[in-house]
Image (spheres, rainbow, N blue to C red):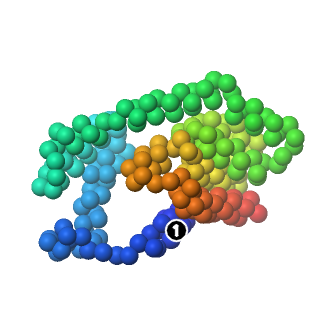
Amino acid sequence: VVAIIAGTWVSLRHIPPRTTSHQAETHDHPIRQGFVSFLPILVVIVLSIGLGLHLIYAFLIGIALSVWMGRKHFEHPIRSVLLKSISLNTVFLIVGIMAFKQTLESTEAITLIADTFTRYGIPPFPLFIIIPFLVGLVSGLSVAFVGVAFPIIFPLIDLTGNGIGYVVLAYASGFAGVILSPVHLCLILTREYFHAGMGGIYRLLWLPAAALIVAGAAICLWTIR
């Protein structure tokens, strides 16, 4: 809820509502058209998470549905659209990110950072913010901050009682780091698509990311009070 409110307020409040030519021709309500546009993504989510279908197959079905739904509106042949969607830069980017993540895990760099914090007697609360945030920031992957940071910080507390609030805090902080990560694949692809500058992007991103951490901290403090 906090992410939706903060993200909407920061990114959409300056965009005036407008009616597209497609809406004017079809008299579609914006909410209905938005749902139809979101349908391929919803199908992927239902097939992969709800029905347990392998993500690759779910994506292929979602792509096929998107092509079928938009077949009347393609400005170029479908074949050329599919060929242009393949980018060597994107392939090298994914390989680079995965290699960077593996390097962090192999060198145990994150573990050394955590050991340094604990050696100086820093209490658990800031560690549950700093360590997941750093892992998310340098890796850009949710899987990385969960897989790397959580095993390091969870032994510091008792999760059987009110410690569940620390889980919320750790996840919110790690996810905020992923959102701000310069190697986050979603951020890079979006920036390249819109030809946006990183400075302008971060001016919009820092507030929603900070709101996530504040919300996680508030929930944590409320559960352990």
Image x and y of residue 81, in percent? 22, 43
Q: Mark 1, residues whose alpha carbon is within 10 Å: few (<14), some, or many (≥20)?
A: some
Q: Residue at x 69, y 27 (%)?
A: 108
Q: Residue at x 24, y 36 (%)?
A: 83
Closest to the observer: 207 or 86? 86
Q: Residue at x 86, y 37 (%)?
A: 119
Image x and y of residue 212, in percent? 60, 60
Q: Count numbered badges in the picture.
A: 1
| Observer able to see residue 164 | no
Q: Is residue 205 left or right of residue 88?
A: right
User: Which residue type carries mark 1?
Assistant: Val
Closest to the observer: 88 or 126? 88
Image x and y of residue 118, in percent? 82, 39
Read off the residue under disc 1: 10
Closest to the observer: 40 or 91? 91
Q: Secondary structure at mark 1?
A: helix
Residue positioned most to the left: 72
Closest to the observer: 93 or 131? 93
